[in-house]
Amino acid sequence: MHINKDQQLIKAFCNHYFWLRIVHHTYKTLFEDTSNLELLEKTAKSFFQNLNRIFIDYLFLQFCKFTDPAKMRNGSNLTVEYVVKCMDWSPDIKNKLISLKSELYEFRKLIEVARHKIVVHRDVEVITSKYQVLGKFPKGKDEEFLDLLGEFCDCAHQACFGKPFGSISTASEGDVFDLIKTLKKSIAFERLLSESSGDNLIKLYDLMK
């Protein structure tokens, strides 16, 4: 089926939202599910501490990408503002998108300074001042943002394709849940290894080759 430029852009916009959901889900599962914290510390503490920082920086960037200006010095950005301003909508759809845009930008206000001064740039004044947490927001605001962005996608997708983008599943084969299972198995294997001797110990070492 041939799709026009606006449809191509909305499809790309929604797919980017889907990717953000996956990244956010992975972060929450690893680092905000307290039942997993001890497991991460026992297996590769430094690695997961570094990964935590990487995830936070990346999520801040992605949250702000959606709410960046539609026009920049070097061209156009496929953002919420671009979808609202630069595409043709019926009055009712446009009003709905504008309303959602206003709510989405409330979250941006909470993290924008951190994005500009720490994540994208290394602001000298911030770095040399007393430590201050930038980009802190009330618990659950990130989830609210994603839910609103999902509504925005559904509205635009419905107008372009006659159906909403729909609910999405972040679970797939080889995802973060499988990683957690594998880490748990590694802890169990390590315990078994420490308690084994003789032929059993040899067999276990052979399994690691």
Image (cartoon, rainbow, N blue to C red):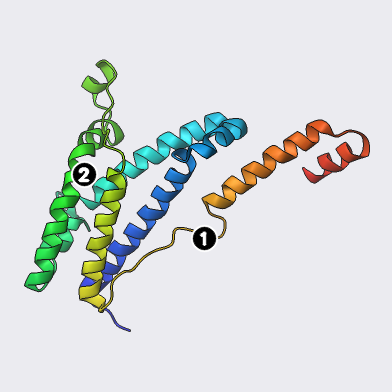
- Give the residue pinned by disc 2: 107
- Give the residue pinned by disc 1: 172
Name of the residue lying farthest toward the bottom:
1
Measured from the top left, where is residue 61 in percent x and y? 30, 43
What amino acid type should be assigned to the residue bearing mark 1? Answer: Ser
Image mark for residue 207 = none
Residue appearing at x 44%, y 39% in the figure = 32
Q: Nearer the viewer, residue 50 or 27?
A: 27
Name of the residue lying farthest toward the left:
91
SS category of the residue bearing label 1: loop
Q: Badges 2 and 1: C-beta atoms under 8 Å apart?
A: no
Residue appearing at x 37%, y 54% in the figure = 21
Q: Is residue 139 left or right of residue 186?
A: left
SS category of the residue bearing label 2: helix
Measured from the top left, where is residue 101 in percent x and y? 15, 55
Q: Give the mark count.
A: 2
What is the CA distance from the residue labelled 2 to the residue labelled 1? 29 Å
Report whether residue 70 is seen: no
Question: Against 162, is 41 above or below?
Answer: above
